[in-house]
Amino acid sequence: MSRKRPQNGADSRPNPKPLMDLSTAYWGSQTLFTAIRLGIFEGLANGPRTSESLARTINTQPHPTQLLLKACVALGLIKEDSIGFSNSDLSETFLVPGTDYYLGNSFRYADDLFSTWGRLQDAVTDGKPAISPETYLGGKKENTTHFVYGMHNRALAIGGAMTKIVDLSGRKKLLDIGGGPGTLSCLFAKRYPDLRAQVLDLPDIVTVAAEIILSMGVSSRVSTIPGDYKKTEFPATNDVVLISGVFHRETEENCRKLMMKASDALADGGMIIIIDIFTDAGNAGPLFSTLFGLNMLLTAEDGGVHADIDVMSWLSECGFENMQITPLPPPMPHRIITGYKDVVLGKA
Ligand SMILES: C[S@@+](CC[C@H](N)C(=O)[O-])C[C@H]1O[C@@H](n2cnc3c(N)ncnc32)[C@H](O)[C@@H]1O
């Protein structure tokens, strides 16, 4: 029943502030994206400057530039003192191009999808992604290259943590299904000198992956297989099958099929590693994971998000044993699920 306005006195209405904040949350996102695109953090990297001086460098109008800078100050992205504006520690660390921890390229992906999110209603109504996945999976060369290098940047961060969590000692042959840039395989190969890996992905993706594998210095042990993981027969007798960032593109039925194919591709005692953004049981949290599910709905034919506990039960029904789930350290939202085929015969 709807709540009525009381005739007099205070009532117990909830505070509407969360709704007001949500309704304007994109103002902050677009302020960040615009500042990155205009080169504001790069322009402020060498100390305080006035807004007029910065506007001349980045070729913008003085008054709007000042409004943007003041909003950045309020967002904690920029500091202001009597001399002018300079980067906050946060921006100096993560938003100045060319520095060790630069995250601007990763935020570019969210920026690229800004207008796509405006079509969420269509995606929910029609059940179709708002953009064609083919555009970044080979259809358009430039988008595909951006997508693969964007995945590479993300995988470098995930992979550093992953190789500390997952122990592949003694394992020699890894199959990386939907391996994208091949970065995770390369990081494992660097850590385990006896490990060889094969990265299976769509033909236009592995063309870019081959460049990345070469640049990571492990091309003698990491190779690519152009193919479609739904149709291509997987090579057999692997010690490890890695499936990272793939399940959020697939239905439960397709995930189960991939698990069965992975099982067939593993030797006894072989290890399956599934890395993804998962929700908790019931799919209603964490918040980032639920919103990520919508992001995937917008960008992939069968996109969404699965609960980690559901994926573990599918693995168990496919015959995997000794499952374990490990979250990556915050702020990374990913979780790693590992399991083993035929533990008794193998070495798990
Ligand atoms: C989010 S990316 C993950 C890449 C990589 N595994 C990682 O974690 O860095 C998903 C990958 O699945 C690949 N993919 C999607 N559909 C595929 C299919 N039918 N066959 C093979 N690869 C596919 C995409 O090209 C993309 O590289």
Image (cartoon, grey):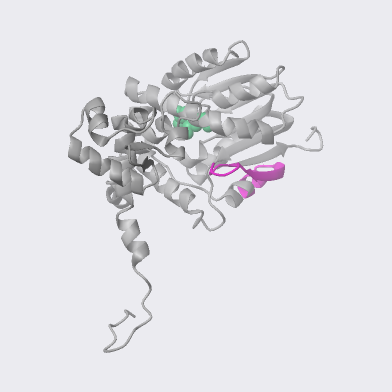
In this view of the protein, can residue 129 be seen by the observer? Answer: no
User: What residue is shown at x 65% (from left), y 35% (from top)?
Assistant: 272
The reply, left or right, for residue 102 in relation to residue 319 is: left
Give 235 or 330, whichever is nearer the viewer: 330
Residue 233 position within the rendered picture, expressed as x and y whole percent measured from the top left: 56, 24
Q: Toward which corner of the image does residue 53 lie, by quadrant? A: top left
Q: Residue at x 47, y 29 (%)?
A: 151
Residue shown at the point (77%, 24%) measured from the top left: 170
Q: Residue furthest front?
A: 82
Residue at 68 percent across and 22 percent down: it is: 191
List x then y, in percent, for residue 64: 20, 40
> Whole-percent x and y of residue 340?
71, 37
Quadrant including the N terminus: bottom left
Q: Is residue 335 above or below residue 233?
A: below
Observer-nearest of 28 and 240: 28
**Residue 280 falls within the magenta-colored stretch:** no
Image coords of residue 11 (percent x, y): 35, 83
Over which residues does the magenta segment extend? 313-335
Assign the C terminus to one quadrant of the image. Answer: top right
Quarter assignment of residue 216: top right
- Asked if the stretch drawn in magenta spans residue 323, the answer is yes
Residue most extreme to the top: 220
